Structures are given as structure tokens and as C-alpha cells.
Image (cartoon, grey):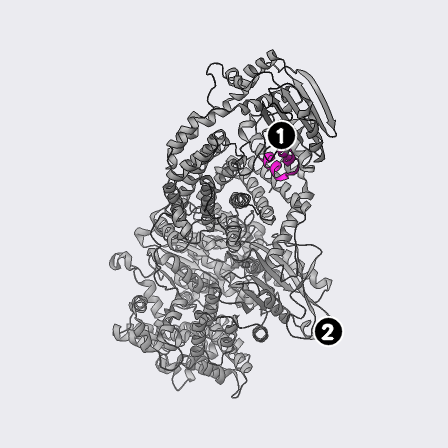
Amino acid sequence: MLPRHWAITALGKNRLSRAEALADQVLLSQSVGTLLNYRRELTQDEVRLLEKSIQVLELAAIEHWADLTHPSIQNQQSRRESEECCSIAFNLTRALPIPTGTEARIFHVLHLISLAYAGQRWTDARRWVFEQNGAIKAPSVANVTWDKRVVYRLFECWICLTRKDGWNDLERVSEIIAGLRKDQNEDEEQFLSQTSEDHRALAAWTLVSLYHWAAATELLATYLMQGTPADIDPQIDMHYEKAAEAARGASDAELEMIIRWLHVASRQMVEGAFWRIARSVNSRVSRYIEHTARFANMFEMLPPQRAAILEEGLLDPAKRSVVVNLPTSAGKTALAVFRILQALNQFSQDGGWVAYTAPTRALVSQLTRRLRKDLGPIGIRVEQLSGAVEIDSFEEGFLEAGSDGAKLGKDKLPFDVLITTPEKLDLVIRNGRVKRPLALIVVDEAHNIQESDRGLKLELLLATIKRDCERASFLLLTPHIPNGSEIADWLAPGQGSSKSISLGVGPWQPNERVVGAFYTERGGRPRDWNLKFRTLQTTPGTIHLSNKDFTVGSPGPIDEVFSKVSNTLSLQAAAMAKVFSEREGSLSLAITANINDVWSMARRLNEEMPLLPEVPESIRLVQRFLRAEISPEFELIDMLERGIAVHHAGLSDETRSLVERLAEDNHLRVICATTTIAQGIDFRISSVFLASTTYPYGQPISSSDFWNLAGRTGRVLQESVGIVGIAARGNKADSHAAIEAFVSSQTVALVSTLVGLVEEAFRAGNKLSLESVLHLPQWQAFWGYLAHIYNQTRSSEAMAAQAEQVLRNTLGYRFLERESREKARALLEVTKEYGRRLSQNSQLATLADATGFSPESLRSAIGSLRGKVEKSDWKPEGLFGGNRNAFQNLMGIMLNLPETKQQLKEITSKGMNERQLANLTADWVNGKSIEELARQYFAGSNVSEAELTEALSKACRSIYGKLTIAATWGVSALSKLPTSGINFETLSERDRWLLNCLPAMIYYGVPTEEAALMRMHGVPRRIAKPIGDMFKRQEKQITKESSVRASEFLRGLTLNDWEQVVPKKIGITGTDYHQIWQLLTGNTEEIKPPSMSKVITNEEELKR
Amino acid sequence: MTTLAVGTRVYVTSVNPVKSEGWELALKDARTALAGRVAERVNDTDGKVIIAAPVSGISLTKFQSSNLARILLTAEVPAWRIGEALAECYLEDHHTYLFPWHTGRDLRNEDASQAGADLVGFRGKGNQVRFAFGEVKTSEAKAAPPNVMYGRSGIITQLETLCQDVKRVDTLVKYMGWRHEGTPWSPLYETAFRAYLDDSADVCIVGVLVRTTVANDGDLRARTKTIAAKKPRNGLLLALYVPIPLSQWKGLVYPLKGGAKS
């Protein structure tokens, strides 16, 4: 919010709004003007309006100048107002033409950078510096007087400080200043002797000022690199104060003012440095900061991170539960890293561990790669669990290893951070698989608590952790929700125990965005139609140019007749993506609701877009991988030649991960995707164009998912403006109005799904009774939760006595208690009644915990399974060998269980029966390739390229998205039932181990236990078996402990080893596979250390 | 402190909106002025604070400090600075101007990144307060007009620049903005700023020629028209005739030191 300052009042709202609008127009014109046929240059009067407005904003900002140089909690309010002034002043200054005179240009740029720092916009200044060429070029120091040379050199230092393109930039600052000191003696004397006597004292004052500025600059660079001197603040203040006084002595108003602004910028830089955190926390944090500064090019916190840590107390150990509301791309993961380090430190004596959950397998993999990269180098082990909802033998070994910390040694613990989905973590927690204490649970995308399908499971997982893991802390990461405090208080009630950090509002955002509607307009000839774009006013405040519809690209941006394109929104989205892909180095996302349309878009773009001038080796590698693992005829391979990729559920997990990696590494131009990408995107894009705002299963994209996606647009160092477009049907008012309503919808308070379930029951029957909801699929997670509680109490009386407390652990009950006592009481009664029901067959409760199935599903499964399988069937050859009757029977049962039927029915609804399901699964396990499976089960014998693509998509979607999840869970659960034909008590340990390997074989699609273990560690399917064989030769016998050694084994393989396992002449080498494995798992090579320090003198500089 | 004597008006010219006046000070009045009010302004405490601190801190920068310290500790105040102080005092006492600090020492570095002005302050009262910017030249040359009126660094070119170069005036306005907070002249700044915000030309431009010669209307006559052609909203050219040779000024301003250091 702007302060109530007399100068702002004098300027008036109208003039200020007009100035801001002008700045927006210039920004849009400069960033995407060519693509939108829009060019905006300012008139002299407009320039003057901007200048005046900047003056006013600065005047208001400097009223609290001391707050900007000495930020603290106490001056937060007035400082925020000053920051807002500086932030707007930055926008306006950025829109002004850059002066052409050398000194004027230097002062303009330094002023712009300072305003950015003062306005918490340093990331924008950094991007601006990257985008500029001429403006930031340091002037030549040849034949200039000493005073000017010092200024030019300091200017270069500040460009390096702002850009921070790696360690070298900061080292250069020290080198330049050391060089100036070396040159001083000779050159200063000469300069002063040539200055007239009248002006000599003024010149001397100027030099005094510049030397203090140089000293402060050098301190700053050193601090950013090394965190020293720890007491930098008073030293910085001293130098800038003396520099300003000396500038006054030199009668140089402009120098004095820029010194004052740089003082603010420097203090803000120090305050935002990662080293700032190291002051108050522990050694792990210092090691992490040291590592990221040196190798990951991370020196400064993003403004919301800084606010969360330094002002909001994110790392306050007294806060057991913290909910962080941050916009997308505000650095939530990095915040989690600090909290993780703190938690691990706190529990270091007890071998504590951290659980991190993400909603999708793709996000789990992305997070694992990211955290491994960040934390691996400082000795923190990050591992992921598979997405299968069962714990196989390997995972069992892995989770339990190191439970006796003393025996294994703390440095041998298999993991410190475990990343997985909520469902899987639920199994781990409920069964107490990890004996070490849970220090912290981090929940990414925690707003999913209100998601209808899986939300309740997540809520109940947190309730279980509250109960079972007394010492655990909670960190919930969400986009903006209005009731963060309520959620934080639910998890750790009591004064001072919880904290909601809401940083959704403030001047900072990752970058500017335009959200608009695109539509087609008839042209003179059928193929000369126009693609139009209209910006929209949105709730979070994006750039909006009212009353203006832009023409995108040239007429007929894709070669199609108007009648077709106007009726095909996905074609329009493709056309938008094509035009915007012309932005240099950009990546556009074209989104539609279903997989077939995604392929159509991609095919069309493949016909229309040019080949990449040079195909990068990473793309070549992925192409070789796809040929070997999917099919030489896979359409994506050819599309990659043009920088086009697809992303949807009809791809293997590995393919999707590799597409993401290519996107992260900036090798792609366009990705065509289904709307589901909105729920699992973790890389930056330049623009996104949606042909549809609904998910493939018909539900509309939620406001938070939409903004999550929109928040990814505009990349950190590349585009000032991210573009988001939604397809409208022509220029029809109702279509545009619907889009406007969609982008303006407000985020709503997070509500428990449990509340919805109770209310639904009341609506249906005016009351809640156990009978009426017992078998409803949506209630099964709740019964599972109660079964777990029952297992701990083992009596219905004890459970009844604790029922209220048990319920109060849920978010839903707390809400009901407050809003409707009647409904809360009804839920309490149902809970008690269910306890009594469980006491009649307490084995069900035990099985529910062991399998993750609800007691009701188990009750029905026990009956169905009786007589359908025998002990001998529960072996690989029994299930996946020639006779698949038993497996077929199991599939039949799974098709009727609420937990598995939905996913399996999605496959059977396409005409596949349970026998074929069993055969498909067995063939998958026995190693048939995706192409073979696609041809055999999802296509006819002679198929076209497009039909093969469709079949491959169906195969991948069915296998990876459905079959592996449902069949794995089902087989694992059914094997544990008393009617499975196996008596667990009499099984040898080895047999039990082998039995528990079956689900992993299904999940990973491999025929041996060792191959499954290799897959678990990221080895691609085709070579998992031979690498597994190699591992087995080393291990002699695969056991629980093997899972801990597997990761080490893989890291220790030589390239020659990798070559040995790859069949010859299949177009891909062992080295390729090794690289793919590295890409998929984030196990990367060591990084080259930075260069040694040196001094850059004038002479050396002139030689360069 | 005693107000400066107004002196005798020896000529007046006016080319709308610029007015030119020549005023001659009596010898006694001139001595009183230089030894009193002007001396105090030249010796303002503001300046002294500047000297002491940074010189002592240069070594903290790890740059060599000996050269600079020597120059700064031995530098003398040039006579033109005394002329500027006289001009400020005279304008304050007789033309409703206010110069809140000894601006002459602050904003006249010709080598500075963007040259400022000798005079930076306000003119007028109540709602009519406006920013005032000006230049001062001190000359004992016999010729009328003296050569300090001409050329690139002559007063006329400087005043023309002040009339036309909004960037330069912006800088001065901004600079005053940095210093106005909490001062007695803050309300004047607000009023002047509002007027400036609505119209950048709504400032006063003033040029002062301090002479030790006999009054001669040829000093300003032709220049009045030149400045008027640049269309300032309000302009004043003033010539002050001081019947004391420049060589004696330092002795009057620093009676005990016989020409003190700055």
C-alpha cells in the first residue's frame, strides 16, 4: 500500500495511474510487442509524467529512508509503504528511455538498480541486467581521468553484484577494487595535479567519496560469497555515510544522492543474503549456504523468503506447525530446505528423519532430484519411495535400516529425507515402519486437503502424525489460502506453537504477467484469419491494457481455413504457442483437455514450425532413449527435432521426467500438454495457452491450480512478461465474460472434505447414520483412520472414550464443532459405533493398517478370495507364468474393491476383460516392451503412425497411470488376507521376502527381484534386468540390506559396466543410459570449483 | 544578525518577465556585511562537520589517504565563495528569497556528474513560494559587461541552461527533497514542489553579478533580453557593486586567521 504522503496526494491518483499504465504499455511493447504487432514509444509529455511521478514516489519513499537502510520488525509498516513507492518508481524508471551520455547512463542504471533493491524487486533488476546489452556495458577506461575511471569501474562492480551470474561475478568485484588500489598511487597524483587549484579540493572530496563507495562495494561482494565480515552492517553504514558526506564536500548532488540510494541497496542486499540466516541457526545451515553460494549461484533470498525467515519466524523452533502461503515460484521449496536442515539438526542425536509429501509421482521425482542436488553435497541423504501404495520388500529393508542408529552408525542411515505421496506415507506412518523419530513433515501443495478424491486421506494422515509422532513438526506449503492460521492451529494448538505465514500480497512477484483471452477473427480469405488477444483484469493484478485487442503474429498464423480453426480451440492454442515460440529462447505451453487433442496440436506444430538450428545433445540423448525404450516409430522423437514435446498421462513416467528435464534446461520451444499439467508443473515457462479450463475428467481447473500454472510463466532471467491466454469462442461477449469470471475468482478458505461428507449425508437423509455411509467409497479413508486408532486401543470402550479426542485431531471435526454441534455429535456417534463394529472383527483393523485398504473393503475381499488362489500361486511363476487363472481371479476381485476398481475399470471400460488385464500385467512383468504391449492390447495388427501413437498413449496411460498402481496395491493387500492360501506365520523369512517382491515386479514391470531393486533406484526398464543380474552377482543373495547398498552400487558402476549391459546395435549406448539414469535420479557429477582470486589493473583491463 | 543594508539602486531594466537591477553598497555597509552576516554564512557549521569526519576515515577504505588528506587540510576558500554568500544574504534580506543552507559550497561543482547551481532555495511567501535557482559570478574586471557573463561557463549560459534543462532542475529539486525532512523550511518545500509538479517552469531563476567596480548598467542591460527570450516564469538579474577590492575580502571574513582554511 502506498503511504499517505502529501506529494502523492499532490500528484493525484489519475496521474499516477496513467504513469503506471504507460509503464505497462512500454513493458509489453518491449517484451512481446513484435508478436502482438504493438509498438509503444513515449512522447515527451509522457516521459515528463513518468519523471514527475518517480520524483513524487521517491520523495515519499525517502521520508522513511532510515527504515529502508535499517529494516526491522518494528518499522515493518512504514518500510512496506516505502518499498511500495520504490517498487512503482522502479517500474516507471524502467520504462524511461536510457540516457545516452556516459555518466547519465551510469547514474540512471545505478538508480534503477537501487530502486529495485529498495522496492524488493531485485529479481527484476537482475533480469533487466540480463536483458540489456548496451545499457549495462561498462564504458572504456582508456584515456579517462582517474575519478571517472573509478566511477566506471564501480559501475561495472555493481552490474556484477546485481547480475550475480555465478561466483565469478562476485570475485570480479574484489578483483576490480584490488586493481583500483594498485593503480591509485600513480594515477591519482596525476589527476590531482592536472586539476585547477580552485577545484582541487572538490576533486579530492570526490575521490574520498568514491573510495568509501568502493570499500563498501568490496565488503558487500565478500559478504555475499563468504558471509564475512559477520558485523558487516555498521561497516557498510560507516562507508556510505562518509561517502555521502564527502560527496557533499565535493558539491556533487547527484553523487551524494546515488550514494544514498546505493546505501539502501547494499543494506537490502546484506539483509537478503542467505548468510543472514546463518547468524541465528546451525552449522548444517551454514554448510548449505556455503555450498549454494559457491556452486548453485544462490546468494540472495527472494523477498518472500526473506520475509518468511527473518520477519515471520519460519525457523523459530518453538513453532511446531507452520503454514506458508506463498505465490507460485516464490521459493517455497528453498524455505522447506531451511526448515528441514533445522529439524535434522534438532534431532541429530536421535537419527531423526523428515518426510516430504507431494501430490503426484512426477512432483515426487522432481522434488527428489532438486533436494538431492541441494542437500546431497552436504551429506544429507534424500530418497524417494515409489508411488505404489504398498511397501515392498526393498522399501521395507530400506525404511527399517538404521532404526538402531547406534548399530549402523549415523553416517550409514539410508535416508534423512524421504519424499513420497501422502498415501504411501500414510502406510509408512501407520505401520511404524521407520523406528527413528519423525522430526518434520513437509506437505507440498497442502491445499489439496480439500480435494474431493484424496483430500481426506491427506487430512487424516496429518491427524495420524499428530497422534503417533509426538515430536514431529509440520510445515504446510500452499498457494494463498485465507485461513492459514486455522490450519496451523489445528496441527499444533496452543499459544505460540503455530504460525501462519502469509506472503501472498506484497510488491514482489516472480515477474509481470499478462492474462488474456485469445480468439479468431475472419479475414479476407479463408486462410487469412486473424488471431486476436485481449488482456483481462484479474484478481492478483496482472498487466491490463484496457480497450485494446491485439493481433497476434501475421494473418493465418497456422495454415488452416477459418471455418476449421474457429471451431477448434486446441488449434488456436497451438497457433498462439507457435507465434510465441518465436520469442528467443522461449518455451510455450499449449494445453488442452484430452490426450488425442494434445497429439493433434503437436502434429500440427510439427508440420508448421522450423527445425531447431542445432539439435542439442540432450535432445539427441532423449531421442535415442525413446527409440530404445518406447518405439523407433514414436512420434515424439521426430517432434523433438523442432523443439516440440508432449506431456500427458499417456507417456511413461521416464518420458515425462525427461521432457521436464529438457524444459528445465531450456531445450524446448513448445510443450503440448493436457490440463493435468496444472497440478504437477515445477519448471518455468514463457507463456501458456489453454484451449480448455477443465480437466480431462470434466472438473474445472481450480483457481489455485490455474494461478499455480500462470505463476510459472515468465522465466527468472529471460522474460520480463509471462503470457497467459485462454481460448474464447470468437468475439462472443458471454465467452469472454466467462473467462473474465474464471480468472477473477477468489481463493476460498481451505475446508476439510470431511465436512462435505457429513453435510452430504445430512442433505440425503437429514441425519448421519453408519449404515447410510458405511459402503460409500468416499468414506473409506475415514474408516481406515478409525481402524488405525482402534489398533492402538484394541477395545471399543477405550476407543469410545477417546473418540472425541481422536476426532478433534481432524480438521473437519474442529470445524463441525464450531459450526454445527448437531453434526459434530452425529459424527462422534458414528465413530463410536464404528469402533464397536471393528471390535467384532478386530483382525480387520490390523489388516487395514497393514494394507491401506478400509476394513469394509477387506471384509468383502476376504469373502471373495476364499478358494480362488493357493499358496503355490503367490510366486512369480504362479502369477505371471503360463497359467494365469489365479491372477485372473485376483483381478476379478480387485475390480470390485473401492480402492482399486476405479482405476482398473478405466482400462476394462475400453473393452478389456479381467483375463486380458491379467495377461497384460504378466506380459509387462515378463519384460515385453511398451510397443509390443501397445500393439498387442491397444491396437490392431497393421496400424498407421497416428494409430500407433494412440495405442502407445493408451498403453502408457493404462500401465503407468492405472495398472501399476491398482494391481500392485491389490496384489499386496490380497496376499495378506487370511483366505489367500498362505499362512504368514509358517512362511520362512525368505518366502515372505519373495512374496513381498511380487508387487514391486508389477510396479516396475520387471521379472526379478534384483531388477525391481534397480528400477527402484531409477534404472530404465530395458536394462534393469541385466544390471540387476550384475548386482546379484556382487551380492550373492538379495536381502533387505541389499536395498541400502543398491544406490551405492549404481553410483560406483563404471561406464564400461554400463556398456556391458546394453545390447549392441539398438541405437543407444551404455554411456547414454548412464546419462539418462543421472538425469532421472539427480545423481549428478561433481562440480568444478571456482577460479582463484586475482587483481585486475587498468593495464590488464585495457589489454582485454 | 543584522540585515544587510539595501544600498542605492543605480539602475533598473525590465523585459517581461525578467527584471534587472543594479545596487551599490556604501563602503561602511559593505564592510559590515562581509565581516558580519556573510562571514557567518561562509563559516557555517555544516561545512565544518564535512571536513573533520571523512578525512579521518579515508584509511578505512584501504586506499592511500596521504595525498587527499594533504589537499583537503590545506585548501583555502576561494573569493567567489564569499561572493556567493553575499548574494544569498542580499537576496534573503531584500528579495524574499531563502537559501536554507550555504548552497554555494554544495552544488556548484563544475566537474560533478551533472552540474548543479550556485543558488538553491526558495522565493516568495505563503502559497506563492517557489523554488529558486541561480548563478553567481564575482568579478573585478573593468570591462562592462565583464567576461564572466560570456561563454560556456559564463553566467548567461548557465542561467539559460537552468531555464531549459528540466533534468538539472529535477536533480536540484530531488536533492532538496533529500534534505527537507524535519527542517523549518519543509513547508516551503512542499508548496514549491506542488507548483513545480504542475508546471516545471514554475520556478524562479536568478543571476547575481558581484562587482568591485563602479556601477555600470551595461553589465546587465543586454543580458536581460537574452534571459527573457528563454521564457522563465520569473527571472531576476541583480548586480551588486561592492566598493572593496577582492584582495581584502578574506581579511574581513576571517579577521583572526587572515584568510582561513575551509
Could you tell me which secondary element the residue under label 1 belongs to? helix
Image coords of residue A1011 (percent x, y): 35, 75
Which residue is labeled 2 in the image? A525
**In the image: residue A483, left or right of residue A284:** right
Local crowd size for mark 1, using a 10 Å CA cut-off: few (<14), some (14–19), many (≥20)? many
Residue drawn at x 41%, y 62% is A369
**In the image: residue A586, left or right of residue A366:** right
- The three-letter amino acid code for the residue at tag 1 is Met
Towards the viewer: A726 or B173: B173
Residue B41 is marked as: none
- Gap in Å between the C-alphas at discs 1 and 2? 71 Å
Residue B171 painted magenta: yes
Q: Is residue A375 visible?
A: yes
Which residue is labeled 1 in the image? B149
Q: Which residues are magenta?
A: B157-174
- The three-letter amino acid code for the residue at tag 2 is Arg
**In the image: residue B27, left or right of residue A333:** right
Q: Main secondary structure of the magenta part?
A: helix
Towards the viewer: A362 or A921: A362
Image coords of residue A432 (percent x, y): 36, 60
User: Which residue of the protein is positioned furthest toward the top in this rendering?
Assistant: B28
Could you tell me which secondary element the residue under label 2 belongs to? loop
Residue drawn at x 66%, y 72% is A568
